[in-house]
Structures are given as structure tokens and as C-alpha cells.
Image (cartoon, helix red, strand yellow):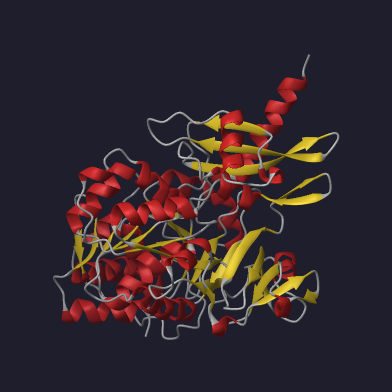
Amino acid sequence: MTVSAAVRRHARERPDAPAFVTADDRLTWSEYDAWADRLAVVLRGTGADGDRVAVLLPDGPAVHAAYLAVERAGRVIVGIGPRAGEREIAHLVGLTGAQALVTDRPEIAVGLGLDAIDPVPARTGDPSRPGPDLADPSDLWLLNSTSGTTGLPKCVMHDQQRWFAFHELAVGAGALGPDDVFMSVVPAPFGFGIWTAHVTPTLLGAPTVVMPRFEPDAALALMARERVSVLAAVSTQFVMLLDAPTLAEHDLAHLRVLFTGGEMVPAARAAEFEARTGCAVLQFYGSNETGALSRTTLDDPRDRRLRTAGRVIPSMQVRLLDDDADVTATGGPGVAACRGPLNCLGYYGDASANRELYTADGWMRTGDVCTVDPDGYVTVVGRASDFIIRGGKNISAAQVEDEVGSHPAVALAAAVAMPDPVFGERVCVYVEAPPGATAPDLDALRAHLADRGVGKELWPERLIVLDALPRASGGKIAKGALRDDLRRRLAAEATP
């Protein structure tokens, strides 16, 4: 089975059923199948089998038709996030050696010296068959970028079979089936968006609601209109939905599952989302590189679903490492590493990055410091590199963010290290307030934490309020941008 074969089957057996839905468009399985075929013929006119074809499109039916067409043309997809800047695009094209660019922005292709291919004309016309489909789901299929917050991205190699294995776990976790209606608001090139919009709904034959750019009020309206039952959103996005003024206006009775993740899930806001929508919040913990190490399911107790990253997935053989020492038997803390069917194929064209990704004996590192309790539940303590070292004490930025985020006037929080001549680093927190609310000042926030019994080491020592926290291309909070902002502020304050 491949994604292409699944689409062909649905086009034959349920041709008029919807595959993708937008605010003003519906694409049936037969239309999806034919669009991909016609575009694949165009792609086969450029380059040779195995060549890379970059795809730079907003989220919508066209980007999925393009991915399917690249597969059917015998090429490898280079998925570029729709919010990528020109420097990132040029880097990914150069690194992968892409020969063509499927895009609605031809000027970018021209600037890079690539063939520009507009997918829209291929949506209609005479049906065409491009040739044989991808036959082996273990072949290289997709190259996508990490959604890191600093520097140029690395490029992750994917085959289809890792996502088919992920699909089986997702179906079991959320009791997913062909009668579900999916909505994925995560950009398609990234792993979370791939399985929630391009793979799992296709294997099930279920429709997927997509939008070119996430906007909370418009998303809620679409969820109500299409009776969405399965929503996929990173934590920042579901918090924005929760804070949207129109949330109470929409009937979301059909929504039963929210898959989230991408960063530490704020437990208090997740509980509020469940209370206001009636759905269950689930997550997979992992990364674009590792796939999932653990998951929560509908069978897990509520406190486990919301306050842990779920149970270890047995086939992923999770270890906890303290430097080179294996501390799995004690439950950690340690950097989580794994080896199993959900792992990617490594980084493309970057031997030094692969040396950092893998241990000497072939286990893939996550970069996250975790604990595992006796029942097998994982708790993410923080990033191995995302600690604030104050006076020699390691303070988890993720823990600070979780506690600060419990304040009712804080929608999102991000903790970063603030250089200090005495302590080395102090805790600086950036916050974004919910719509219509005023964020607390530093004294009020610290009083709130004191009332919660939070230890003083987790209290912020500086608070900066922004209208909106910056996002990286994958939807996560862009901490690199926040660190740059803090450096500029400190430099300005130091200037006489």
C-alpha cells in the first residue's frame, strides 16, 4: 500500500465523496486522483526518476495534489513550509538539489533558477496517466525541514512506511474511522501535518478540512459547518481557538478528539478546552525526526492524558541517557532516545547533524530531558538545551512556562535565559494575553505563583508582554526570535 494506491482505490470506489474541504471548495476523491495524474505528467517532463521536486504552497487541496503528483512522477518531494523565508527556501533547494518548484509564487522559482510549475491548470483537462506509481513504501519519499527556532533548518528524510506505522497507532489512540471528519491546521510539510492531513485521512477514506492560513474564528466556523470530529493543532493553535471570542457561538458537538503536541501541552488550558468543547485531548510525544515515543489514548485517565506525554510505545524501545550512561532503569531524568519503526531515515546531506542525532550504537536522540514513571508514563522535563542556569541551578523553561500559563490572563508563555553578571542567567518570561484581557504585571504574576505553591526558582524575574509571540515555520513559539529581542532590549537599556 502507498498513499497513491489508497487515493486510486477511493477514486474508484467512492468517486464523489469529499477528500478535501475548504471554506469555499470541495475536492472529491476522483478529482484529487485526476488532478495528481495530470500534474505528474507535467513533472515527468522535467528531470529524471528520483530527482527532487520542491513544493511551496499554502495549506489547501493543491499542496496535497502536488505531493501526490510528485510521488506518481517517480520524484522525491521537498516540502517547504508556506511561511518559509527566501533564505530558508534557497537553503533547502540548494541542499536537496531540487530541479523544479511547484508553487503559486513563480518569482521565487525564477530567482533560484528553477522551473516554476503552477499546479492549478492541471486541476482540469483531459485525464492522463503519468506512469507507474511508487512501488515500495520504504523508498525515500519526502524531504522536509525541521521547524527549529534558530539558524538554517536541517532536512529530514522520510519514507511512507514510518507514517503508515504512525497511522495504526493514531487509529488505536483515538478510535479513528472512515466516518470521522478531520481538520488539520498544521502546515502540511511537517510531520504532524503529514499524518493528520495527507496520510491518515487518506488511508481511512475520510474527508479533511484545510485552510490556507490558520485564523481562529474562521477555523471555528469551518469546524461547525463541516461537523469536524477530529482536530489536529499544535498547542499554540488550540489555545488561540480557546481564546477566540466566537468559540461559544459555534456548535462543536461533533468534535470528539483533539490531537495536539509540538511543544509542552499546557494542562490547564487543555482541561479548559475539554470542558468547553466536550472532546478528549490526546497527544503523541516525539519529533519530526524520531516520530512518536509515547502517546495518550482515550483509555488513559484524564490526569494522565493532560499532565504526561502518555505511555511509552513498546516498539520504539525508549531509553533515557545521562550523557552516555543509561538511566532508564531508574526512570531518569535523562535525554530520551529511541529506535523503532517510527524513526525517520536521518538528515539529508548533513553528516555532522546525523552524528549529533544518533548515539554511537544507533539510537536516535530527542534532545528532550524526560522521566518515565513505573507505569510507563513519560513526562517531559524540558529541552536538553532549554534550561536556564541560575546560580548553578538548572531551571526547566518548560516548567516555568507551564506554571506561568496557569494564570487566567496568560494565553501563551515562553521562558528564556536573561544574562546576569551575578547569577549567570535569570528567568525572563514573554507572555501573550487572551483577546480582550490585560496580562498581569510581574508582581501579580508572582503572587499568583505563590498562591499555587510554586517554588521561587520557577518565578520569572522579568516579564515582557507582547501582542503576539513570534512563531517558527512549524507553528511553535520562535524562541530564537525572543532571545534576539531580549538582547536588543538589554543593549538599549545599557546604552547611556
| Residue positioned most to the right | 422
Front-lying residue, 257 or 128? 257
Report the quarter where the N terminus lies. Answer: bottom left
Residue 466's x, y, as percent?
52, 31
Residue 141's x, y, as percent?
48, 74
Q: Quadrant of residue 415?
A: top right
From the viewer's perspective, tell me whether residue 196 is left or right of residue 454.
left
Front-lying residue, 100 or 173? 173
Can the viewer see residue 214? no
Question: Residue at the location (72% across, 45% down)?
Answer: 457
Question: Residue at the location (32% across, 78% down)?
Answer: 203
**Picture layout, residue 338 above or below residue 100:** below
Question: Residue at the location (31% across, 71% down)?
Answer: 201
| Residue positioned most to the top | 496
**Picture layout, residue 56 above or below residue 248:** below
Can the viewer see residue 431? yes
From the viewer's perspective, tell me whether residue 393 is left or right of residue 125.
right
Residue 65's x, y, as percent?
32, 64
From the viewer's perspective, tell me whether residue 310 is left or right of residue 216.
right
Q: Quadrant of residue 197?
A: bottom left
Query: How many tags in the picture?
Result: 0
Residue 135's x, y, as percent?
41, 85
Report the quarter where the C terminus lies. Answer: top right
Q: Quadrant of residue 128?
A: bottom left
